[in-house]
Image (tube, grey):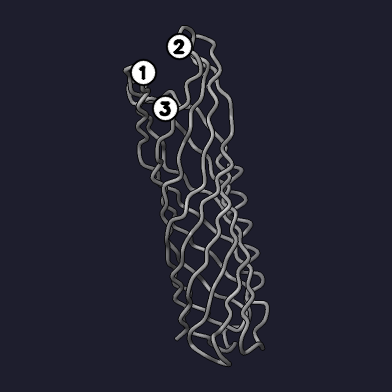
Amino acid sequence: MKRTLILVGIFAVCLALSPPAGAAEKGWHLRVFAAGFDPSLNETQQNDDGDDIRVTSSTDLGFGGSLEYQFSNLLGLEVGYMAGTPEMELSADVPGYGELAVAAPMSTSVITIEMDFHLTPKSPTIDFYLGAGLAMMSYGNVHFDLGDLDDTLDLRILDDSTWAAKAGIDISFGKNSAWGATGVIRYIDAKLEVNNLEGSPTDFATFDFGLTNFTVGIVFSF
């Protein structure tokens, strides 16, 4: 419910700030980029035996693209897609074995729908903008090989919908050029709902997965 209210609030602000329908049209912006994923996952959980298990994640460099229709000097609607495979890492002190540390890739893809506010409409070379909207997260199952324990652990991770906010800049390669460089920093308020594929399908643990996302690439405006 809290996330739903935040999303409704974001779009209400977007509509309130929209310029009149007669404002100048700016057309389309196609962006293709490398996408960095830097999740904040770092939690400790207890298993059924009371042993502490630390869950962390690593960064990853993936790819993505987006298409924005800027329908006025100030406002545009952008749809994007990104994919990467940050690792999920488990570590624990296992009785009779010692310290266990394993890692496995976690397929992660994001679809974003964001309203962009362009703050430098009169500049012929620099387009600085702020944006906010919806992020739809999709995760693959995670398979851990527990090594010398001669066992495996398979985790299911539920998809998630949440909010995202960003700041971006496009810099044209020449005055009024259609081509330019683009860069964005974005925060996605994601969570992971995880359970063991061999356990109860309704028994999920929830982890904060706040995702800082960096993109650098090329923009073509037409």
State the residue position of label 1. 148
* Mark 2: amino acid: Tyr
- Type of the residue with mark 1: Asp
The residue that disc 2 covers is 97
Q: 73 and 84: which one is in front? A: 84
Q: Quadrant of residue 148?
A: top left
Up/down of 176 relative to 145, above or below: below
| Residue identifier under label 3 | 195
Quadrant of the rendered image containing residue 185? bottom right
Name of the residue lying farthest toward the bottom: 175
Residue at horizontal 48%, vertical 50%?
A: 60
Say whether disc 1 or disc 2 marks the residue closer to the N-terminus: 2
Tell me which numbered mark, 3 or 2, is placed earlier along the sequence.
Answer: 2
Q: Amino acid at mark 3?
A: Asn
Give the quadrant of the N terminus.
Answer: top right
The alpha-carbon separation of the residues under discs 1 and 3 comes to: 23 Å
In the rendered image, residue 110, in percent from the top left (x then y), is placed at: 44, 54
Which residue occupies 35% across, 36% down? 141
Marks 1 and 2 close (CB-CB < 8 Å):
yes
Q: Position of residue 7 (x, y in %)?
A: 58, 54
